Image (cartoon, rainbow, N blue to C red):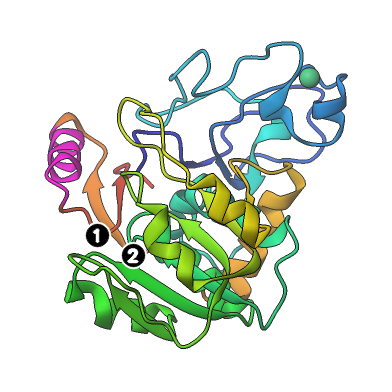
């Protein structure tokens, strides 16, 4: 649960022009809700970057309908959930899954590449699974040893605890480094273990959006790329869901009832930093 923009529901009614959905279909949606459908970004599927200022989560409105019992949505922005996938497993993929999938599939990553994932949380625990299933060699970085076993279970081939460490030791340099923490990491720690021409994907969103210091000259000498892979084209969502269903990529979730008490309890656990890793609110009749 990222405060309610990862949603799954059953189609209860459709308008006269709807062609791709029928009543009873199980669908999910994320934070991209519309687009002008005419500008270059919308035509390429990147509606989040719509040049005509369409209404988007993070930009203008936080009302996604996922804390309610029903929502009205455009058919082009909801996506069928594979039959083999439980709704509670699908919901966290609608943003978190899509985000890491975007980094892993749109910028040249190949099977056999070395992937580093900093932070084993809501996004990181998905990134480890996707990268491992894509045939990459995965190194997980976490502050302490506490998540070593879980990272390994999720598919990480190597695990490195970083708290208090001044030098990282990895068996192989990192070609693609995904940052999935809730604070900005000190990139200088990771410089020595980056491959030449490595790509760095900052996907962290720290509270208050503080600026981030980048060791630019060492990165320049490495020919590194920093890629803000926030959101991909819409056609990727169904591919991501299909891949996850086929290969058994599953979020680790904690379920709460979709009631005021359930929402309060889940938010508290989130604020306490104790959620492992996605809190899912489940409606009684789901
Ligand atoms: Zn547009």
Residue 61 percent location from the top left of the image: 48, 15
Residue 222 percent location from the top left of the image: 63, 61
Please tell me which residue is depicted at 19% across the width and 76% down the height of the picture. Answer: 145
Side of 33 where 71 appears, left or right: left
Which label is found at residue 15? none
Main SS category, magenta section: helix
Side of 208 where 113 appears, left or right: right
CB atoms of marks 1 and 2 within 8 Å:
yes
- Residues rendered magenta in the picture: 261-273
Please tell me which residue is depicted at 49% across the width and 55% down the height of the picture. Answer: 90
Q: Residues within 10 Å of mark 2 (few under 14, many from 20)?
A: some
Side of 104 where 117 appears, left or right: left
Q: Is residue 51 magenta?
A: no
Figure quarter occupied by ligand 1: top right
Q: Is residue 270 magenta?
A: yes
Q: Secondary structure at mark 1?
A: loop
- The total of numbered circles placed on residues is 2
Q: In 3D space, how far apart are the residues under numbered discs 1 and 2 (Cα atoms)?
A: 6 Å
2 or 27: which is nearer to us? 2
Viewer can see residue 207: yes
Name the residue beneath numbered marker 2. 252
Residue 74 percent location from the top left of the image: 68, 26
Mark earlier in primary sequence (1, 2): 2
The correct choice, above or below, for 15 with respect to 198 in the image is above
Which label is found at residue 276? 1
Please tell me which residue is depicted at 40% across the width and 56% down the height of the picture. Answer: 188
Residue 72 percent location from the top left of the image: 57, 22
The correct choice, above or below, for 125 with respect to 171 in the image is above
Please tell me which residue is depicted at 74% across the width and 42% down the height of the picture. Answer: 233
Locate the N terminus by quadrant.
top left
């Amino acid at each position: 649960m990222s405060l309610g923009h990862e949603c799954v529901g059953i189609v209860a009614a459709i308008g006269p022009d709807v062609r791709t959905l029928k009543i009873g279909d199980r669908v999910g949606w994320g934070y991209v809700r519309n687009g002008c459908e005419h500008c270059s970004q919308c035509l390429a599927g990147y509606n989040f970057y719509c040049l005509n200022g369409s209404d988007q989560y993070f930009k203008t409105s936080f009302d996604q309908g996922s804390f309610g019992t029903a929502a009205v949505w455009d058919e082009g922005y909801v996506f069928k959930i594979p039959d083999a996938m439980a709704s509670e497993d699908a919901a966290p993929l609608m943003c978190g899954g899509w985000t890491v999938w975007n980094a892993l599939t749109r910028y040249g990553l190949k099977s056999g590449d070395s992937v580093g994932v900093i932070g084993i949380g809501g996004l990181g625990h998905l990134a480890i699974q996707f990268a491992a299933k894509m045939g990459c060699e995965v190194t997980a970085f976490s502050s302490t040893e506490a998540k070593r076993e879980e990272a390994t279970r999720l598919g990480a081939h190597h695990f490195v605890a970083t708290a208090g460490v001044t030098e990282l030791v990895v068996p192989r340099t990192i070609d693609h480094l995904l940052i999935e923490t809730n604070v900005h990491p000190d990139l200088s720690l990771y410089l020595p273990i980056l491959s030449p021409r490595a790509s760095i994907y900052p996907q962290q969103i720290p509270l208050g959006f503080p600026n981030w210091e980048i060791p630019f000259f060492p990165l320049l000498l490495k020919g590194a790329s920093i890629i803000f892979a926030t959101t991909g084209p819409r056609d990727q969502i169904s591919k991501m869901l299909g891949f996850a269903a086929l290969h058994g990529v599953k979020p680790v979730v904690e379920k709460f009832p979709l009631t005021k008490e359930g929402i309060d309890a889940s938010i508290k656990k989130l604020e306490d930093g104790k959620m492992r890793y996605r809190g899912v609110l489940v409606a009684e009749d789901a």
